[in-house]
Amino acid sequence: MPKKNQKKQRIQADKDVQTKLPPGVKLVRTFEGHQSYVASLAFDPQGDTLASASGDGTVKLWETRSGELLRTLDGHQKSVSTLAFDSKGSMLASGSSDQNINLWEVSSGKLLRTLEGHKDRLRSLTFDPLGGELASSSDDGTVKLWEAHSGRLLRTLKVHQDSVMSLAFAPHGNALVSGGFDRKVKFWEARSGKLMRTLEGYGIAVFCLAFHPQGDLLASGSSDNSIRLWEADSGRLLRTLEGHTQVSDKIAFSLDGRLLISRSQDQTIRLWNCETWETAAVIPVITMGGWIPALALHPTLPLLAAPSSSLETPENEKGQHIYLWELDYNVLLGERTEESGASHAVHHTTGKIVLLGDHSVGKSALAHRLIHGTFKKQASTHGQQFWVFPALGKRREDRTERLAFLSAGRAEDRGVQQR
């Protein structure tokens, strides 16, 4: 695509995102440069650098403050699916569909070593809080623990019967939790690899995990569209959060524990008030679809990064740009006083309209006509498509913000989750 058209597309994308943002969320920066979808994001512990992994096989390092591209790391043969910084921010781990883990020196971009041993695509990477060990999980059903500075394999845990989609160390570092396609969440003693407990009850896959900063609460997201909150010490289910209409594939707590952020395949990010567990805001994010669990919270500032696009962006290019939003906690959590000009808390509701039919009967063209008011011939999508329906996304009299989605797909695709 010509650079002139790319610039126009970015300006339109930024305009779309800014006009559709809820109160308390402000777009402050756009990072662009990847040639394919952004699959994973991570801030370094100081928050100075944002790392992004992409389907184009590269990792890019960006200066958070300016948005300047610092360097591009080339070393994987296939798409890069997961990233993690060590506790000092001096080392970055990247995992790929080529089954390998690369360890990079952040300051120079030098490839320190490549870790081999997994037999399928890498799904999750996480360093323990002290930075001494790196845990990795894969579609091969295993979790491996590595000595970070040497790359030596310490142990292999055959933990699940299917893909291990997510890993999380407890903040104190003595427990490692894994979640996978076998519908289970498992707690492991980090040093010995001993199984401590198994959380069951999911009907389908567990996609993501996150500990509350205090370590007493574990959140998990599933392909049943829900987020579950567990008491970490006992494994007791405390609460189930509902609101997403598709897979919840990435979750994270803010550093102060006041917000839980969840990203879903329903093309939204939800911000949850951790005191009331109500939805504080919904941010629309437009990507190619499928499993793109890219989301990162700044470690010290109220900044949220995620890939998104304009509604006008061609389908195969959606999700290449990274947006950085500033979050106003006072507005989102309703903590301003009347004297300071605060607005009351805003509630949100999400709806979905589905067009089902046989292949090549004009569902996408009809959807374009409903969304934009004009007819435009559409290429075959070979699967399910989603559009934000702006005509229905208006505030009700009770101050509830409505967000509606229109989707089109084949009847036999209904209910099938993408992996």
Image (tube, helix red, strand yellow):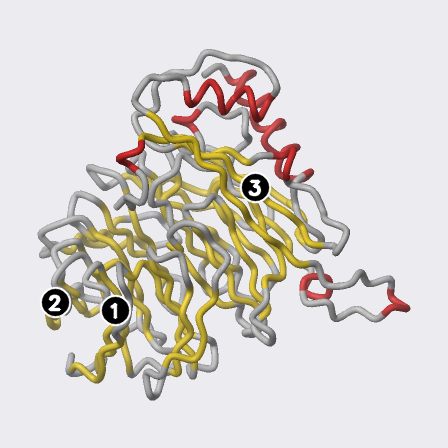
Residue 80 is left or right of residue 317, and the answer is left
Indicate which disc residue 178 carries.
1
Residue, disc 2: 153
Reply above or below: 376 against 251. above
Instruction: Pick the residue in front: 174 or 377.
Output: 377
- Taking the spot 47% from the left edge, 82% from the top edge, the residue there is 214
Where is residue 131? Give x, y as percent: 32, 72
- Rounded to the nearest whole Å, what is the CA distance between mark 1 and mark 2? 18 Å
* Upstream in sequence: badge 1 or badge 3: 1
* Upstream in sequence: badge 1 or badge 2: 2
Question: Which residue type carries mark 2?
Answer: Leu
- Tell me, yes or no, whether the two marked residues, 2 and 3, touch with CB atoms within 8 Å: no
Give the quarter of the image for residue 8: top right
Where is residue 144? Give x, y as percent: 16, 66
Indicate which disc residue 404 carries.
3
Question: Which residue type carries mark 3?
Answer: Ala
- Rounded to the nearest whole Å, what is the CA distance between mark 1 and mark 3? 33 Å
| Quadrant containing the N terminus in the rendered view | top left
